[in-house]
Image: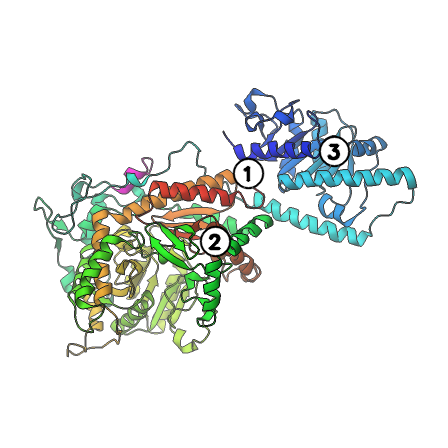
Amino acid sequence: MEHRTSRQHVVDMCRTMLERGYLKATEGNVSVRVPSHDCYAVTPSNYDYDRMRAEDVSLVGFDGKPLPGSGAGLPPSIECGMHANIYRERPDVNAIVHTHQPYASALAFLRKEIPALTDEQVRFLGRKVAIIPYAPSGTSFLAGKVQKKVASGDNAFIIANHGIIALGTDPDRAVFNMALLEKVSLAYLLALTTEAGKIYTIPDAIREVAFSKLRKDEKRIAAQITAAVEPVRVPPTEELPSVTDAPVAALPAEAVPAPTKAVPAPTEAVPATAEADPAASASDGPDADGLLAAAADLASAGGDDPAASPSAEAAAPVTAKTSADDVPQPIGAESAALGYAISTYPDVDDTMRRLKALVAQPIRGLRHDALHDVLNYFETKCRASKEITDRAKTRIPGGVQHNLAFNYPFPLAIEKAEGAYLTDRDGNTYIDFLQAGGPTLLGSNYGPVNERVAEVIKRSGPVTGLFHEYELKLAEIINRYMPHIEMYRALGSGTEAVMAAVRGARAFTGKNVVIKVGGAYHGWSDTMVYGLRVPGTFRMNAKGIPFGATGSTREAFPHDLGLLKRKLIENRLRGGTAAVIVEPVGPESGTRPVPKDYNAKVRELCDEFGALLIFDEVVTGFRLGLGGAAGYFGVTPDLTVLGKAVSGGYPMAGGVGGRADVMAVFGSGLDGKNGAHVQVGGTLSANPLSCAAGYFAIEEMARTNAPVLAGRAGDRLTRGLQRLVDKYGLPYVVYNQGSIVHLECSGVLLLDMRHPVKLLKENKPRKRLMEQMSAAYAAHGIITLAGARMYTSMADTDEVIDDALARFDQVFALVEGV
């Protein structure tokens, strides 16, 4: 049934008023605005409200005309034109009650409006309860007179000889206001009949203070309508994308176990878009021929500056291992054949428009009673987690060791991770969309990798301190699927890898300045804690870091290629730029998604100014596909930072790779040759445990096509969430880049220093909302990354996603104004 929720609200309001004696069987009418649509649900004319069903409720447009096919054929209330006028005039009104109260009717006959008798009356009903002049019921004359009166901002009116109108920001408030009006009407009528001329009202100053609070609330709620954009429309009948739609492409049999599903040859591979979304155009993602062509180009880069060109060896034509029919394939063909996680690239202009509209609106979070229930879940169901994390505060700063574990109201202590699920110390099970921050693309605690890793470390132990074969195997398999990574140096984390990449770029180019994109996260090294998360904040988060450490770091605002070019010009006058480092899908894993051609344009600027291009693929490496973001976008970076998935969820996940001539700076000095020696290392770097885990995990990703499967799960989750946002008329923004799914409810990371007053005023409440929504999701069995981002994995089947959507449905029903 279309707009069932709004129709059911009408039924529930009628039942509540009948139970409390506010409404008789067939008198009056009730309506509820349909969120994000120019229509409302209203009671049918002369119908027994005690027997009313949701399907009996009529839908009427804001033009006052019934929508076809609604109301089970019953005509709507004759006052539907009046309701339409109110909704058009007052965007803060989401529910209306029009009924006949005996006490208010008596005042109507006397033409006595109710003055400001109490603070409560003014706070909820307005300065006064005015009398609307008489006009015949059901006519445009009455509708017009009502519209003029409601523009005052008051929420209750007496219609001469036609009962009363009570307005509310939600159904419960409308019923409350009607009940309050009845109480006030009775009190005033009694006062008039006993002490006429001796009625005392509250002081004018107090009245204005109370009314200003009411108007503030009304403006806040009105902005949720006036500043909103139409949500992405997802028809209830639309079939969601399915994980089973993901293609499985053929690879050379000698490298990877044969897939279980027949597939076309690599040269005939169909892009994932065509499988998952028949309506999507070929431009939504690289097609097979385009991917193979791009893969062939990965060995060369533009520009004449030696710092921006590949090594001579890399420039030579290279072919991958031959396929089953011995036809040589261009380098990178295997990654291209497998496809990529992104079936349809987000419409960046539309997404940013929606994100800006979200930030322009007042925050929209949980109702107070709903938040109380969420907190009660943690207090009663998560006692073991609270006990151990409270203990931890005495020995661990903040009580946890990992930033992602700082959860509201307190961290959950996890005992078991398996596939798509986590289980805490109290035995509560959760759908895991955190996936440890992104590395477990195969799903948590993946058995086939665990078993093979155990065999390796049974022989070598987890660390040897000397060379081990899996150091080479990991570098070789990375090069196989990311051929632009000609050499690879394993380190301990993404942060260490970024440090090495920046240091190597400076050593190779002889230049000092590095430019990052504002808001991007590149770890916590001294150089990169600059413009962190919020663009334009420079050193705001750099406590404990000397000014000299960030003296050669510059920041460009997201999407602003003109500003990036100006920075490059300024730096050229001061000795040049060593590197530009970017997250290829946008800052904070695509929280500000970049246009699809953005990376290519950054590559052109780097070539023009002789700077290296560094891709931070800690998140996107292997998650977007085995070719990474470089393969998907068809852009060749000079250096690539890997982490997370490169060790398959095992520790010491990090490394830097790239062109052989640039990477040589990490080896010179060790082998006795002359040259700049860049100091990098680590006792546990490239240990057998991490390298073997990474090698086996990448093999499994190729065998199962895990990146594409996880991407289709992300598509299903995204489309389902968009349907729920549409259903409830929420301002939230949902989009995905394959298996990276964004659910923005507060937009806190969209704030920046170009609007400093808004940042200072709204940063804390928007962050608090994000924490509360994260807690609400957890209380309903879903773990997210800070309530705003989710990572899907190969373990997320259609059934898992559908279960999650049912849980999200329950949470969205708790949002204020729903």
Amino acid on which the number 3 mark rests in the picture: Ile
Q: Is residue 763 left or right of residue 627?
A: right
Nearer to me, 401 or 604: 401
- Lower sequence index among marks 1 and 3: 1
Q: Residues within 10 Å of mark 1 (few under 14, many from 20)?
A: many
Per the image, the residue denoted by label 2 is 774
Per the image, the residue denoted by label 3 is 164
Amino acid on which the number 1 mark rests in the picture: Pro
| Residue at screen point 53% across, 57% down | 768
Nearer to me, 342 or 238: 238
Q: Is residue 38 magenta?
A: no
Query: Circle 2 — which element?
Result: helix
Amino acid on which the number 2 mark rests in the picture: Ser
Q: Which span is picked out in magenta?
A: 271-281
2 or 1: mark nearer the eye = 2
> Residue 676: x, y in percent?
22, 77
C-alpha gap between disc 1 and disc 3: 25 Å
